[in-house]
Image (cartoon, coloured by chain):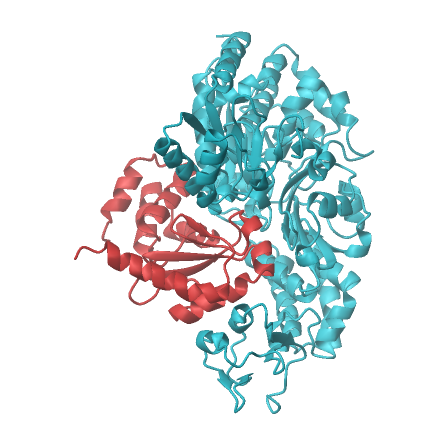
Amino acid sequence: MNYPEIKEEAKRYHREKLNDGVLKIFVGCATCGISVGALEVAEAFKNELKKHEIQGELIKVGCLGICFAEPLVYIMKNGNPTICYKNLKPEDVSRIVYNYFIEDDPCLDLAIGTLEIKEGDIPYIPELERFEKEERIILRYAGTIDPEEIRDYIAMGGYEALDKAFTMSKEEIIKEVQQSGLRGLGGAGFPTGTKWEECFRAKDHPKYVICNGDEGDPGAFMDRVILESSPHQVIEGMVIAGYVLEANQGYIYIRSEYPLAIERFNTALTQARDFNLLGKNILGKRFDFDIKVFPGGGAFVCGESTALMYSIEGKRPMPRVRPPHSVKEGLLKKPTLLNNVKTFSCIPPILLKGGKWFSKIGTMNSKGTTVFALAGKIKDSGLAEVRMGTTLGEVIYQIGGGIKENKKLKAIQVGGPSGGCIPAEFVDTPVDFDSLKFLGSMMGSGGMIAVDEDTCMVDLARYFLAFTQNESCGKCTFCRIGTKHLLLLLEDIVKGEGTLDHLQLLKELSESVVEGSLCGLGNTAPNPILTTLRYFGDEYTAHVIEKRCPALFCRDLISYYILPEKCQRSCDHCILKCPSESIKPNEKNIKVIDQTKCLKCGICLEVCPKEYHAVIKVSPKIGEVNA
Amino acid sequence: MEKSEQVEEILGRYSSEKENLLPVLQEINEKAGYISRETMEQVAHFFRLPPSEIFGIVTFYKKFRRKPLGENPIHVCLGTACYLLGGKLILDAFSRELKIEMGDTTEDKKFSLDAVACFGCCNVAPVIKIHQQIYPKMTPGKVEEVIINLQDEKKNNDPV
């Protein structure tokens, strides 16, 4: 079959599927939805439909990116607009089935909005503030198509770019990519077109295409969502790259912590082969290309391209000196093109709409969009795809809905362990490769963690250092031993054993680690320290001089304390739950913590009923004498 | 050297190209729960590599365990979002209740405790994962209950 026939068939399938008059229930079933009970909700729908003998079809889709609203369900009922429901519990299902399916009352109190034109009081989802700020290119199909059904993707225009690519010369394709101004979205921001051209010009054969899906950055989950929600766009981008380079083999490296992503990607590969979009003589062209999934082993350094290639080769994944660059000598010493999941996802729209179209989006030096995983103390966590140049504040407040419990934003951590902490006063900074670098942070893979006043910046730096120190491959002395000493210094400080000399040493050693390391892991590992020292120096001095943790986080510098005036005498939740039996009532039946026995586990604070709110944290810690 | 049949069966399905080394180790780790010294030697023999090289690779990746997994492997997420929202307190609570350190297995082999970097479920942080189930929005106070439920589940499933 040629492409137009495939597309026609897929469109017919898609049209019939949606317009057969049967009730459709779409359930968001990416990891984020499943973890909060999406499968139970789907099961409840199935049972209720059966009970009332209603004909309906359950369709599992990916993630719309509004993860805070999961389990998310949207329902297409004949004659009504598609309504999207949020945070559904299995017990809400019987109500929707009865009230909406039978009685025609759509239970709008459970809904966020409609996916079609606004009607009555119900909001139209694309007009919600969050979506108005977003521009979806990479996430264009996330959550709206069935990731396990290739015809859904094709019906939306999928693989059309591949068909178009076959009519273009290889140079023309490269030119479009160059003209688009697309830069690698894995973090480093290297111009994609240049990379493609260099690999294209490399003389040696065979060549390889690798997609980097080793999202090892804690707190980032964009690649997972893309792979779970719309795997075909990545495949399409990779096949186009393979065609340009005349490569026959592609690999996608997915971290094994994402079993669902691996499973769905494999399903997608099988379907693409069935439709002759992968494998031998793709779409009747004399071009063979196939992709193999390679599950990663959970090593952060494998995100570095040369290490990733060694990992596929079965060697110990330690980065090597470049040059030679992997576009000349990569996997098995052959020319290899490696791009990130998001970068490959941008290729089909660039080919379809042209490089010029793409280059109009974004800023002078950073084109297109970028996807952030919003997490931490943010209200509406999830994914946000914004034009380059959108400000941090717009992302945090308009898309993320601000900070939980209406607390104050203290800092924004961008780029994970390699990034830096940007203080709240810089919320007007535009998000692009260069502006973030200027502030000492970096785009990184796209994790964006909002931090409020309850987070200790010193401990946050310690946390990231503990991560990078552990993940250092050990090749370079400064990274291997330097990060260890940085960590020891920070551990002293959070324990209250630091001195002013510690701070000086931290700064000097950080600079040496940056200089003395070969790959990005070591080069950027000190970023969290350098940025927190720069912007939150007063927190460091509070730890060192006053032995106090202003955020009340560092365990060795705080005490838990029960306010006598608030303690409810008849309640003994804290006593019952305290694992070290360190809470005893005094003669007035007011609870008192024995500070010498307290483990600082935080359970008393958790179980003290909200209306009393008697347990607090204090810093510096209460002396053992006056406990 | 005593050869494990399970490992032999897995090796039998692969060719001895080095590209297969990581997939083989992953399958063993998943099915046997860990990779013992003996297994490393067996794998080394199959790939015609020095056992030290296999050791080097097994110890490099976090995912590979060198001690058997408990019947209920508890994975506490310490990704950034989970950590900020109290993941460490949850890890400490498990460690205290089970009386084992991170990376260990209880004496009765019922539980093992590990920390992981991120499951990508940051929206419901802090989380833990046991078998394939994610427990959203954990607190230290819920830890005891999780352990008791797992013990009960076991009892209910045991043939009387």
Give the number of callouts. Answer: 0
Can see residue A444?
yes
Q: Position of residue B57 (x, y in %)?
A: 44, 50
Q: Residue visible at 66% across and 62% down?
A: A461
Residue A255 seen by the camera: no
What is the quadrant of residue A371 in the picture? top right
Q: Is residue A216 above or below residue A60?
A: below
User: Chain A appears in which tint?
Assistant: cyan
Q: Position of residue A93 (x, y in %)?
A: 46, 39
Q: Is residue A410 above or below residue A41?
A: below
| Quadrant occupied by the C terminus of chain B | bottom left
Examine the rendered structure and indicate whether residue A215 appears above or below residue A597: above
Q: Nearer the viewer, residue A270 or B53?
A: A270
Compare residues A60 and A193 and report the one nearer the observer.
A60
Is residue A482 left or right of B12 when viewed as pictured? right
Above or below for A592 versus B42: below
**Chain in red (letter):** B
Q: Residue at x 64, y 25 (%)?
A: A347
Where is residue B95, by image quadrant? bottom left
Q: Residue at x 57, y 31 (%)?
A: A83
* Residue A40, percent from left and from top: 42, 42
Residue A552 placement (x, y as % from top left): 66, 71
Q: Nearer the viewer, residue B43 or A565?
A: A565
Q: Residue furthest front?
A: A103
Residue drawn where x is 18% and y is 55% of the image: B159
Quadrant of the rendered structure where residue A593 is? bottom right
